[in-house]
Amino acid sequence: MGTDLEQVLVSKEDIDAKLAELAALIDKDYDGKDLLIVGVLKGAVMVMADLARALSTPVTMDWMAVSSYGAGTKSSGVVRILKDLDTDIQGRHVLIVEDIIDSGLTLSWLLSNLSSRGPASLQVCTLLRKPEAAKVDIDVKYVGFDIPNEFVVGYGLDYAEKYRNLPFVGTLAPHVYGG
Ligand code: PRP
Ligand code: MN
Ligand code: MG
């Protein structure tokens, strides 16, 4: 682990075990249904890839790219669509897959955007959530880990586009982001 990282917060083993648990719940809840999982680029790439492979339910996959952070460490609340879905979700069972819910602003915006398209159902699965950072109250059906309000990177999560490829979630040393 480089000196940019302070500590491992969620290990690869913990992530694997949690995704297996969540996948079992999702398999049960969507049994016999046609499920579309929607990954939110870029952060959710790792969760999508591993969750999808942990599921037994056949799914289709689509992606949206939105960004609310830019290069900073704080959510701006300004959400931009960089890439929309390829799929028409009207009448579909849709599960949004996220790496982290921080302020909740990205997801809150995404939920209202996607629900206006008339899906049969719309739920959320996130690997991480920071309860202390929440600015909006969102009902999230599948949550991996509630974590403290620290800046975390790895397993899809970036700081200025770096660290996404770490196989675990770690905290960033304050000197890296001027803290
Ligand atoms: C991060 C993260 C979530 C969102 C959570 O994405 O992946 O999508 O911020 O923050 P919020 O709950 O405060 O809105 P980001 O905008 O950094 O884009 P990225 O996934 O491409 O890194
Ligand atoms: Mn993201
Ligand atoms: Mg980011």
Image (cartoon, rainbow, N blue to C red):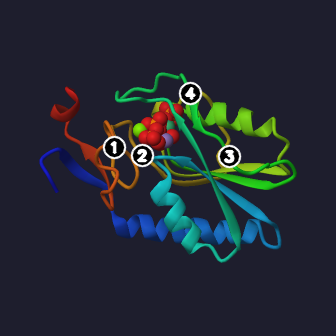
Pointer 2 residue: 147
Q: Position of residue 39 (x, y in %)?
A: 58, 52
Query: Tag 3's secondary structure?
Result: loop
Going from the N terminus, do you reach mark 3 or mark 1 first? 3
Where in the figure is residue 84, as x and y percent of width and height?
A: 65, 41
Q: Secondary structure at mark 4?
A: loop
Label 2 crowd (10 A; few <14 / some 14-19 / many >=20)? some
Q: Kindly report which numbered mark, 3 or 4, lies closer to the viewer in this rendering.
A: 3
Left or right, 41 with respect to 72, comes to: right
Contact check, label 1 and label 2, Cβ < 8 Å: yes
Measure the C-alpha gap from mark 1 to mark 4. 20 Å
- Mark toward the viewer: 1 or 2: 1
Q: Residue 52, located in which quarter of the rendered image?
A: bottom right
Percent of width and height locating residue 15:
42, 64
Cβ atoms at labels 3 and 4 below 8 Å apart: no
Q: CA distance from mark 3 to mark 4?
A: 15 Å
Residue type beneath disc 3:
Leu
Q: Which residue matches tag 3? A: 85
Dot 3 or dot 2, earlier in sequence: 3
Identify the amino acid type marked 4.
Answer: Val
- Disc 4 or disc 2, which is closer to the eye? 4
